[in-house]
Image (tube, coloured by chain):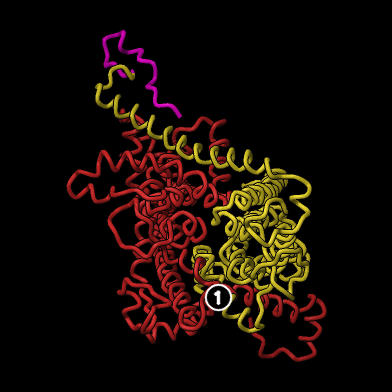
Amino acid sequence: MTVTAPPATRSAAGGPDLTRASLAGRRRFTNHLATAAIWGALLLAVIPLALVAYTVLSKGAGVMSLSFLTEDIPNSYRREGGGMAPAIVGTLVITGAAALMAIPLGVFGAVYLNEYGKQKPLARLIRLMADVMTGVPSIVMGLFVYISWVLLVGEQTGFAGALALACLMLPVVIRSSEEMLRLVPDELRQASMALGARKWKTTLTVVLPAAISGITSGSLLAVARAAGETAPIIIVTGIVFSPNWNLFEGSNTALPAQIFRNASTSFPAAQDRAWGAALTLIVIVLGFTVIARFISSRFAIKER
Amino acid sequence: MTVTNESPAARQALNRRGGNAVGDRLFSWWTLGTGLLVLAILGLILITTVREAWPAFDAMGLRFLTERIWDPNPAAGDAIFGALSFAYGTAISSLIALLFAVPVSVGIALFLTELAPRRLRGAAVTVIDLLAAVPSVVFGLWGILVVAPALVPVYQWMHDVLGGVPVLGRLFGPVGSGRNFMTAGLILAIMVTPIITSITREVFSTVPRADKDAALALGATRWEMIRGAVFPHSFGGVVGAVMLGLGRAMGETIAVALVIGGATNITANLFAPGNSMAAVIVQQFGESTGTFTAALIGLGVVLFAMTVLINVFAQMVVRRAEARMKGSVA
């Protein structure tokens, strides 16, 4: 939008001059200053992003190799070489299990909010609390799962990590899915009802399929965010140095936890592995994000 | 609808014809159950963490919050668990983060809603999305290995120039490793910018078109229009967005744990190392036992209570602001 005044045709005829040039210098100056500040703000956001991206790429690429992706983690920070295979396995298995738990539950929660609860007080409370739950620090979720699961089964496992990540994903999935369900036109529901379908059948066969692309992309974004969570993983999954595919037995590890552990040491070899792990993690997270964006832009329900 | 004179047989026939009414009810209960899961988890978090932290609360009483000494393994006597130093670290790093993040976020939101050419808007949104997508541990890694060492000369220069100023100089005391409150605040600022930006932007976009056009028609410059039409309309929503950012900054664990320095410390010097509540938990949980573990969980309880309160309040502020805006669009 532009603020340029319309061409001051009247000024030639002796009327008031309405062009920008007639503004008092001070007002013009303030306006320019504000515009510059706004552009500056954007620049301030771009700089750290560019710096992080550059550093991770340049330092991570130096470490990256096939053996980095397939070898075990050295059990001493000092030792050079080695890889991140156990952490990659852990990230995929733990995040996958978390997604399997959180996405179905979250979608049905969203169905309750949008199809049944609507503006009832209970639904409004759940909506508010889901928003609040997205703000619960991940470390608190880690402590919660530690107390209610790890202490119960007496062992740090990958599944405990998956539980914690699922708790973190749940509210995000609920709220994003609800937004998508809201975009489904009411006519679809009415048409299905008019054909004699029960509400559950309408919901499962008409409403959810209509919103599935949006739900998928929202869920993928939640998965991407969960894959980068560190604190709960450190608290509830323990650590391993060789890949552990079993979620329910034995400790596990994940890329974020490895980045954290290796970054806090002062050994160059460990720091190199941290950069490599960071690059791997970013590629995984960005992969999910890009797929999500693609699905949402390609198959989105058009807002009416 | 009356069901009093409906015979069981008729009802059965009705059920057969219309599909499965039992299925309908089961389905609605099932979805309700999944919705209630959110409330259940929040309730369970509160109950289980408080119960598990009780030994520490019991041993320390109110001193848990007012004591600045944190000594889990003293040479003699009982262990002392005081959260005050960490609460201070959490508060200071979050405040620094907001100090930097709020103007930038509001600026970006204004850029997106009022200033951006159509083509640049998409790019700017992508930048914010990417900033939000970078895992916090990567910011932490970058912070500890790149930013902290790079900022040491800058801090040193600020200390040399401003350190002598009375009162204000105390903020810019002697510089150590570069891992300190200031670095933690800066890294946090980068991490909360996306969330503040996205909510502020939503609030700005609810400002009625007519108000903005009216301001412009009266001869206001764009900045005067923003000050006169956009800001007054969206003040409440921006406050809510800032509080959400505060909640996020307080709960952030990993990046802070890496760059804040790890010292139990209350000092006005922004260039001194400290620690935050969330960071202490993740740093010390692995080596803790007994009351020590309980005390760390106690920190979690305090953190949980504070973030939930802030978030509830912020959400209500944002909702009220948005409802009012939507109501005012004629």
Q: Is residue A176 visible?
A: no
Disc 1 crowd, CA 10 A, few/some/many (<14, 14-19, 20+)? many
Quadrant in the picture for residue A164: bottom right
Inspect the image, locate mark 1, and give the three-letter code of the amino acid beneath it: Phe
Q: Residue at x 30, y 12 (%)?
A: A11
What chain does badge 1 belong to? A
Outermost residue, left side: B166
Outermost residue, top side: A12
Question: Residue A277, image x and y in percent?
Answer: 66, 51
Whether residue A35 is in magenta: the answer is no
| Left or right of A266 in this view: A38 | left
Quick check: B274 above or below A32? Answer: below
| Left or right of A157 in this view: A123 | left
Magenta stretch: dominant secondary structure: loop
**SS type, badge 1:** helix
Question: Residue B186, image x and y in percent?
Answer: 42, 48
Q: Closest to the observer: A284 or A207?
A: A284
Q: Residue at x 39, y 74 (%)?
A: B71
Q: Closest to the observer: B23 or B120?
A: B120
Q: Magenta residues?
A: A1-19
The colour applied to the residues of chain B in this rendering is red
Q: Which chain is yellow?
A: A
Question: Residue A142, image x and y in percent?
Answer: 56, 70
Whether residue A9 is in magenta: the answer is yes
Question: Residue B262, image x and y in percent?
Answer: 43, 61
- Check disc 1 and report the residue beneath it: A144
Q: Is residue B253 visible?
A: yes
Q: Quadrant of the N terminus of chain B?
A: bottom right
Q: Residue at x 27, y 27 (%)?
A: A27
